[in-house]
Image: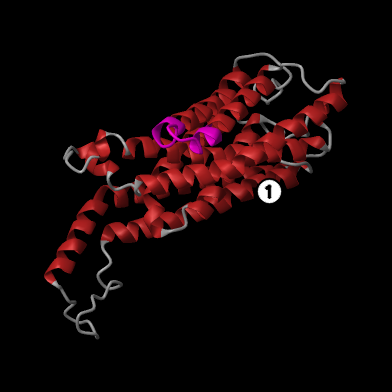
Amino acid sequence: MHVNIELARYSDWAFTSAVVALVIALLLLAFELAYAGGRRADARARVLAGAVSADSATPGVVDEVARRPVDERAGRAGLAVVYLGTGLLLACLVLRGLATLRVPWGNMYEFINLTCLCGLVAGAIVLRRPQYRPLWVFLLLPVLILLTVSGRWLYTNAAPVMPALQSYWLPIHVSVVSLGSGVFLVAGIASILFLLRTSPLGDPGNDSAPARLVRRFPDAQTLDRIAYRTTIFAFPVFGFGVIFGAIWAEEAWGRYWGWDPKETVSFVAWVIYAAYLHARSTAGWRDRKAAWINVAGFVAMVFNLFFVNLVTVGLHSYAGVG
């Protein structure tokens, strides 16, 4: 099958541009997070003092647009650059698909890019409120780590998909698993931040620098709600992805389940998330205990993504990495 080298090159440029854009967004959002505490303190002081803008057209009303601080402007700009980076990552996948005339998730490089794209889109939907902007810092960190590993060590030249993967189940199975994995990324980050928010670092009496940073997160109830709602969505999606993989396995190898390392760890992760959802609705297991289970599911997903594909040998070892 012919590969359009020019489109493949544009895809690589889009990937590099996406990573650069997301790094810039991370720096801008981190700047806002670092200095947001001072801005809030100033805002409270103005409210208590009854401050009024000198050139305000309406007495007693502060001109928020004119007085918008630098850190807030940086945060708004950072969010705009996040959307730009997300669009560039989408362009990377679309161009690679056009270059190879196939769905662009036939190896680990493409799969990780698709998973990160799903995570970014999920973040854009779930974290759209201004008060959720601090969470983007912690979502972009793992996304950039994944993209760095993908581009540096897992990159594969644009090429036709290997014969073993030439099936109509490839776009169905991999896209659904990527969507579930990307949304689980948001859920895992929310649970980790929830654990920090409900730890001694979230105590108002703790005046250490890490504690002041943690108190700039949304409140614990909000973080718990984000983790729960994203898991509620991702749980059946990922489950269907595993089921579609089993159907594909029966069609390709004549059996639905063979305890391949990838499918085994995927099933274990799915069971952990089922335990989280059960614990989340069980008295005595809510809050921190349930959050720890959700984090365990997140760890299982990361383990499944890297260790199983890169170290173990199984039916999922194609992955474009050896």
Query: Any magenta on residue 280?
Result: yes
Instruction: Depth check: give the residue in front, 231 or 162.
Output: 231
| Left or right relative to 31: residue 242 | right
Q: Residue at x 83, y 38 (%)?
A: 168
**Residue 271: % across, % down:** 61, 27
| Left or right relative to 211: residue 156 | right
> Disc 1 marks which residue?
94
**Residue 58: % across, % down:** 24, 85
| Quadrant in the rendering for residue 259 | top right
Q: How many labels, in total?
A: 1
Q: Residue at x 54, y 44 (%)?
A: 230
Report crowding for label 1: few under 14, some 14 to 19, many 20 or more residues within 10 A (C-alpha).
Answer: some
Q: Residue at x 59, y 32 (%)?
A: 274
- Tell me the quarter of the image containing the C terminus: top right
Establish if 75 lies above or below 106: below
Q: Residue at x 66, y 20 (%)?
A: 264
Single out the residue that lies furthest toward the left: 49
Instruction: Depth check: give the residue in front, 277 or 212.
Output: 277
Q: Which residues are magenta?
A: 276-290
Q: Is residue 105 visible?
A: no
**Residue 178: % across, % down:** 64, 38
- Circle 1 SS class: helix
Instruction: Tell me which amino acid carries mark 1.
Output: Val
